[in-house]
């Protein structure tokens, strides 16, 4: 990997907080996000006696079933991807994220409210940041016909394709290129895209102890025969855009994400994290001089 253009690191100019119900737990928690110059992005479980710190890194990932979980079983934090995508997409490199429970609130199903709060407090320059490396060779992972790849490119871009045997969703794609902070397009193009689910899968997922907090106010639900149960959509391809949101959040766990074109098709949190692990390994190998 080669060196990319030098950039300044940023943290929040002030703190903010939001409360809401977790998608899978159905439990209400409050998240407070504070400036943390030079400390990276990390969670703190303030409801636990020792107030354990959980770094937002690939090494912290413990579960990827329908969301991304960090930490340990008793001191973890679940469904971190939307908040982390908002921070990464808005250029917040350093943040202390205090949470008083296991799961980050789903809010209305997207990253929009997180982005609005970040925009309201603003950013300040933090400590100097090592320039992101340029990817020089493709890295990918696949399972059957699903895959996620990182391809050499002059700028960072995320492209996602999905294909569902449900007429209202079908096959759709979206591509988003990272833009400078002063004209950041993440807030308009990606952050508002909400999580989505299929009506015929809901009962089975709930029996597995999942999506206890999901409802028509915080997730798009699609029925095979009836189509979307809670229209209107914010974008014609809102599901594909939401998958980019998830990918941005998951790949933000890489310590120094390289400049690349990240391309995914029918992927999952599990595949996202597998790619993140491969990227991290390739960066570590290069630092050791093994390339």
Image: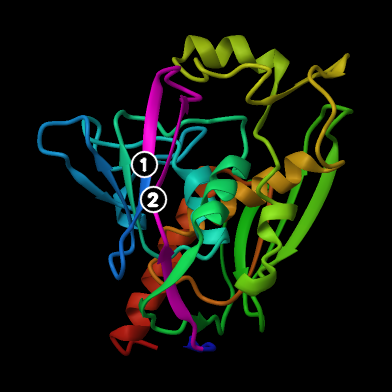
Seen as rendered, the residue at the extreme left is 50
Specify whether residue 220 is in view: yes
Q: Is residue 98 left or right of residue 216?
A: left
Q: Position of residue 283 (x, y in %)?
A: 39, 77
Pick whichever, 176 or 108, lies toward us.
108
Q: Position of residue 91 (x, y in %)?
A: 52, 65
User: How crowded is the residue under tag 1: few (<14 C-alpha within 10 Å), some, or many (20+)?
Assistant: some
Vertical comparison of 41 with 279: above or below: above
User: How crowded is the residue under tag 2: few (<14 C-alpha within 10 Å), some, or many (20+)?
Assistant: some
Quarter of the view holding residue 74: top left
Quarter of the view holding residue 16: top left
Q: Secondary structure at mark 2?
A: loop
Q: Position of residue 191 (x, y in %)?
A: 65, 48
Callout in the foreground (2, 1): 2
Q: Is residue 107 left or right of residue 76?
A: right
Specify whether residue 266 is in view: no
Confirm whether the magenta stretch covers residue 49.
Answer: no
Q: Is residue 152 left or right of residue 124?
A: right
Pick whichever, 120 or 130, lies toward us.
120
| Residue at image location 34% in from the left, 79% down from the top | 285
The C terminus lies in quadrant? bottom left
Vertical comparison of 230 with 60: above or below: above
The reply to whether dot 2 and dot 1 touch (C-beta < 8 Å) is yes
Q: Secondary structure at mark 1?
A: strand
In the image, the segment drawn in magenta is: 6-32
Residue where numbered disc 2 is placed: 15
Q: In the rendered structure, find residue 144 and report the number of the disc placed on it.
A: none
Q: Position of residue 225 (x, y in %)?
A: 88, 14
Pick whichever, 59 or 80, lies toward us.
80
Residue where numbered disc 1 is placed: 32
């Amino acid at each position: 990997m080669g060196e990319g253009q030098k950039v300044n690191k940023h943290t929040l100019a002030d703190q903010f907080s939001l409360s809401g119900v977790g998608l899978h737990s159905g439990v209400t928690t409050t998240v407070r996000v504070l400036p943390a110059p030079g400390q990276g992005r990390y969670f703190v479980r303030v409801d636990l006696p020792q107030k354990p710190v959980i770094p937002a890194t690939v090494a912290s990932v413990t579960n990827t079933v329908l969301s991304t979980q960090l930490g340990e079983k008793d001191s973890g934090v679940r469904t971190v991807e939307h908040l982390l995508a908002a921070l990464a997409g808005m250029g917040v490199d350093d943040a202390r994220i205090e949470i008083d429970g296991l799961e980050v609130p789903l809010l209305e199903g997207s990253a929009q409210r997180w982005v609005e709060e970040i925009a309201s407090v603003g950013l300040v320059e933090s400590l100097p940041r090592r320039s992101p490396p340029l990817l020089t060779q493709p890295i990918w992972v696949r399972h059957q016909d699903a895959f996620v790849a990182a391809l050499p490119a002059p700028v960072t871009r995320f492209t996602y394709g999905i294909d569902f045997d449900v007429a209202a969703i079908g096959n759709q794609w979206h591509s988003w290129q990272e833009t400078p902070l002063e004209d950041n397009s993440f807030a308009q193009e990606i952050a508002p895209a909400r999580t989505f689910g299929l009506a015929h899968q809901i009962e089975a997922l709930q029996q597995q102890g999942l999506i206890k907090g999901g409802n028509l106010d915080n997730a798009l639900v699609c029925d095979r025969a009836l189509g979307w149960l809670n229209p209107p959509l914010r974008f014609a391809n809102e599901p594909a855009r939401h998958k980019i949101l998830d990918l941005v959040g998951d790949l933000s766990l890489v310590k120094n994400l390289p400049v690349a074109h990240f391309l995914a098709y029918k992927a999952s949190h599990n595949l996202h994290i597998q790619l993140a692990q491969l990227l991290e390994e390739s960066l570590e190998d290069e630092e050791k001089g093994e390339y």
